[in-house]
Image (spheres, rainbow, N blue to C red):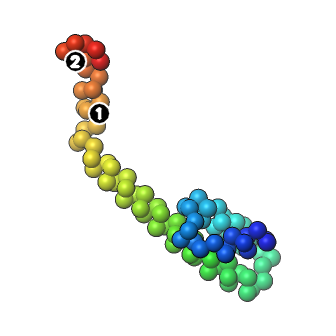
Amino acid sequence: MTDNRNKRNIPVDKMTFEACFTELEQLVNAFEQGQLPLSESVLLFERGMELVKRCTEELDQAEKKISELLKKLPDDPAARLSEDKEPGPQGDR
């Protein structure tokens, strides 16, 4: 678990979503093995909570961005697509 200890030195707010998620998976695996001393379990649990918070924040931001993008779509995207397929005056579409 030496590599994981080095990862815990990286501030969560400096990590990407993917890095946080990967480390969180590793923490869960370590807990599932059940071989951790209590003191290390508490430290890992605390780190896991920080990682969950960061992942949740990133997902919330992504969801907000997607919602904003979807609001910019026309009311009926299918109608818009069929309009784009109709040939223009020169028939070049």
Residue 6 place in picture, x, y as percent: 72, 72
Residue at the spot x=33%, y=49% of the render?
69
The image quarter containing residue 74 is top left
Relative side of 9 to 71, left or right: right
How many residues crowd mark 2 within 10 Å: few (<14), some (14–19), many (20+)?
Answer: few
Quadrant for the N terminus in the image: bottom right
Q: CA distance from mark 1 to mark 2?
A: 18 Å
The image quarter containing residue 73 is top left
Amino acid type at mark 1:
Ala
Q: Which mark is residue 64?
A: none
Query: Can the viewer see residue 48 in this picture?
Result: no
Query: Can the viewer see residue 88 in this picture?
Result: yes
In the rendered image, which residue does mark 2 sit on?
88
Quadrant for the C terminus in the image: top left
The image quarter containing residue 51 is bottom right
Residue at the spot x=24%, y=26% of the render?
83
Q: Where 27 sits versus 70, above or below?
A: below
Residue at the spot x=61%, y=62% of the render?
19
Q: Earlier in the sequence, mark 1 or mark 2?
A: 1
Residue at the spot x=77%, y=75% of the render?
34
Residue 49 place in picture, x, y as percent: 57, 76
Amino acid type at mark 2:
Gly
How many residues crowd mark 1 within 10 Å: few (<14), some (14–19), many (20+)?
Answer: few
Q: In what element is the residue under mark 2?
A: loop
Residue at the top extreme, as displayed: 90
In the rendered image, which residue does mark 1 sit on?
78
Q: Where 48 sits versus 93, above or below?
A: below
Residue 54 place in picture, x, y as percent: 52, 69
Relative side of 62 to 89, left or right: right
Q: Mark 1 or mark 2, which is nearer to you?
A: 2
Q: In what element is the residue under mark 1?
A: helix
